[in-house]
């Protein structure tokens, strides 16, 4: 996969599959795991867009906007991973995205699926971090640090919303209040810190 240039015998520059210079090689198993995570982010993008559509069809503007924004966020995360792979001199390997679930029994079911997706993404990031540490790949741990922090916060926010929606117990008035809060961007968990 890697080749060195032969045009200058004193050169020790290594090039990746697309011809980009590589400053430090990346472990092949770690690269594969990063590629898999990128595709997981793309799948989350499609899933959250499907949830945005489901809520829009039910006239729940706040929920729909929330999931549209989350879908866009997942797309941005996938782009960050693609850029990182390119930065490391490798080629991005996109896989087919499966058709997402598009039908749920209730808003609580949508939130439960979304929370589980966040848990899975968090677990994937933690596995990447562990792999990077095992291979002494500091570049990857530095890249992942802010991603892990943001993902943990996102998981916390989805747990909060799931709890609120479950507490609403499918009561229209309560769901409309939550929908209005989401529409106004007031969807953060309570903070006990000043």
Image: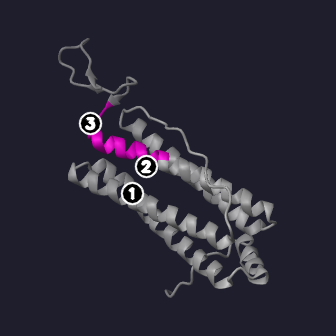
- Separation of marks 3 and 1 at Cα, in angstroms: 20 Å
Residue identifier under label 2? 37
Residue shown at 36% from the left, 32% from the top? 89
Give yes or no for contact between labels 3 and 1 (Cβ–Cβ under 8 Å). no
Circles 3 and 2: CB distance less than 8 Å?
A: no
For the image, the number of numbered tags is: 3
Residue at image location 74% in from the left, 68% down from the top: 62
Instruction: Residue 64 in the image: state x and y as whole percent.
Output: 72, 63
**What percent of the width, then of the height, locates residue 108?**
64, 73
Where the N terminus falls, by quadrant?
top left
Q: Residues within 10 Å of mark 1 (few under 14, many from 20)?
A: many
Check the image and report above or below for 35 versus 152. above
Distance Cα–Cα, label 2 vs label 1: 8 Å
Q: Does residue 25 show up magenta in the picture? A: yes
Residue positioned 35% across, 37% down in the render: 88
Q: Which residues are magenta?
A: 22-39
Left or right: 97 in relation to 120:
right
Task: Look at mark 1 in the image and give the residue it sits on.
Answer: 125
Q: State the mark number for residue 25.
A: 3
Mark sitting earlier along the chain (2/1): 2
Q: What kind of secondary structure does the magenta stretch mostly adopt?
A: helix
């Amino acid at each position: 996969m890697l080749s060195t240039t032969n045009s200058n015998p004193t050169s020790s520059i290594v090039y990746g599959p697309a011809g980009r210079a590589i400053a430090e090689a990346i472990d092949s198993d770690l690269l594969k795991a990063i590629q898999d995570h990128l595709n997981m982010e793309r799948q989350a993008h499609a899933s959250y867009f499907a949830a945005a559509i489901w809520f829009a069809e039910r006239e729940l503007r706040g929920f729909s906007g929330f999931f549209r924004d989350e879908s866009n966020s997942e797309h941005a995360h996938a782009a960050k991973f693609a850029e990182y792979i390119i930065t490391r001199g490798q080629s991005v390997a996109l896989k087919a995205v499966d058709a997402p679930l598009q039908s749920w029994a209730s808003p609580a079911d949508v939130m439960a699926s979304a929370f589980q997706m966040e848990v899975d993404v968090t677990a994937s990031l933690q596995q990447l971090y562990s792999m990077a540490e095992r291979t002494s790949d500091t570049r990857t741990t530095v890249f992942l640090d802010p991603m892990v922090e943001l993902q943990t916060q996102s998981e916390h926010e989805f747990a909060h919303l799931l709890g609120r929606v479950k507490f609403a117990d499918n009561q229209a008035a309560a769901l409309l209040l939550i929908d209005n809060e989401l529409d106004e961007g007031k969807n953060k968990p309570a903070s006990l810190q000043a």
